[in-house]
């Protein structure tokens, strides 16, 4: 039995009647003067809320830019996106990817992981190399191309 996935009964491996996984990847501009302590509070809030909503993902913060990857049931993700759009700690949200597919979670153990901008490429390459299904590999390959095309530079990761 794969114990890392047991918290989420909606996963593909859970058998018939599975629900698709909704995924949103976005970046946004942090509000002027946002402190590191505010980012720590965002992570703490996320870890409190996300498990009960079935949301997993990662958050990167660097050079005044947020980059977040969230996946879970569609209604939970849409509710969170509504909250994120009203959150005054950031603005100019730009959606980079939005998909709904039956596939495994890419970061099943992360209720919301804060990843350093300098580590994001390694995290995504690792997720791609260990992913078991073609949809995940495709999504991660696309995202890595986007990162290499400029987003990493914008976040001060080079
Ligand atoms: C960049 C960013 C990412 C966030 N990510 C999450 C998240 O993954 N989950 C979450 O519940 N709240 C997240 N939040 C906070 C929500 O916008 C919102 O403030 C929070 O869910 C409200 O929780 P509260 O009612 O307990 O204060 C994030 C906020 C920002 C600015």
Image (cartoon, grey):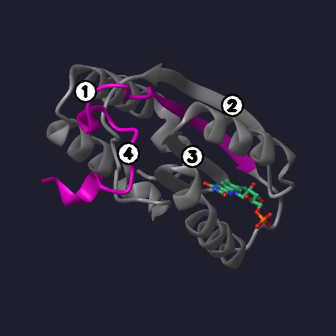
| Disc 3 to disc 4: CB gap under 8 Å | no
Give the image location of residue 55, x and y in percent. 52, 49
Region of the chain picked out in magenta, as a range: 1-29
| Disc 1 to disc 3: CB gap under 8 Å | no
Give the image location of residue 88, x and y in percent. 87, 55
Q: Give the foreground label among 1 and 3.
A: 1
Asked if disc 3 is less than 8 Å from ligand 1, the answer is: no
The residue carrying pointer 2 sits among few (fewer than 14), some (14 to 19) or many (20 or more) residues within 10 Å by Cα, namely: few
Q: Give the foreground label among 3 and 4.
A: 4
Residue 36 in view: yes
In primary-sequence order, the first of circles 3 and 4 is 4
Q: Which mark is residue 67?
A: 3
Q: Which mark is residue 84?
A: none
The residue carrying pointer 3 sits among few (fewer than 14), some (14 to 19) or many (20 or more) residues within 10 Å by Cα, namely: many
Asked if disc 2 is less than 8 Å from ligand 1, the answer is: no
The residue carrying pointer 4 sits among few (fewer than 14), some (14 to 19) or many (20 or more) residues within 10 Å by Cα, namely: few
Q: Give the foreground label among 1 and 4.
A: 4
Q: Give the foreground label among 1 and 2.
A: 1
Q: Which mark is residue 137?
A: 1
Vertical arrangement, residue 9 with respect to residue 93, above or below: below
Along the viewing direction, whichever of 30 and 139 lies nearer the viewer = 139
In the picture of the structure, the residue carrying the numbered disc 4 is: 9
* 123 is within the stretch colored magenta: no
Q: CA distance from mark 1 to mark 3?
A: 19 Å
Give the image location of residue 146, x and y in percent. 44, 27
In primary-sequence order, the first of circles 2 and 3 is 3
In the picture of the structure, the residue carrying the numbered disc 2 is: 94
Q: CA distance from mark 2 to mark 4?
A: 30 Å
Along the viewing direction, whichever of 41 and 116 lies nearer the viewer = 41
Q: Give the foreground label among 2 and 4.
A: 4
Determine the residue positioned at 81% across, 67% down.
Answer: 33
Vertical arrangement, residue 138 with respect to residue 73, above or below: above
């Amino acid at each position: 039995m794969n114990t890392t996935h047991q918290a989420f009964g909606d996963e593909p491996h859970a058998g018939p009647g599975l629900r698709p996984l909704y995924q949103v990847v976005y970046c946004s501009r942090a509000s002027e003067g946002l402190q590191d302590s505010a980012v720590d509070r965002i992570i703490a809030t996320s870890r409190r809320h996300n498990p009960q909503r079935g949301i997993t993902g990662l958050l990167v913060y660097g050079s005044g830019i947020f980059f977040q990857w969230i996946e879970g049931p569609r209604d939970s993700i849409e509710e969170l996106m509504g909250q994120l759009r009203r959150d005054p700690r950031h603005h100019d949200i730009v959606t980079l990817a939005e998909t709904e597919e039956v596939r495994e979670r890419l970061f099943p153990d992360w209720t919301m992981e804060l990843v350093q901008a300098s580590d994001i490429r390694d995290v995504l390459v690792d997720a791609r190399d260990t992913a078991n299904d073609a949809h995940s590999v495709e999504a991660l390959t696309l995202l890595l191309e986007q990162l290499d095309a400029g987003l990493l530079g914008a976040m001060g990761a080079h």
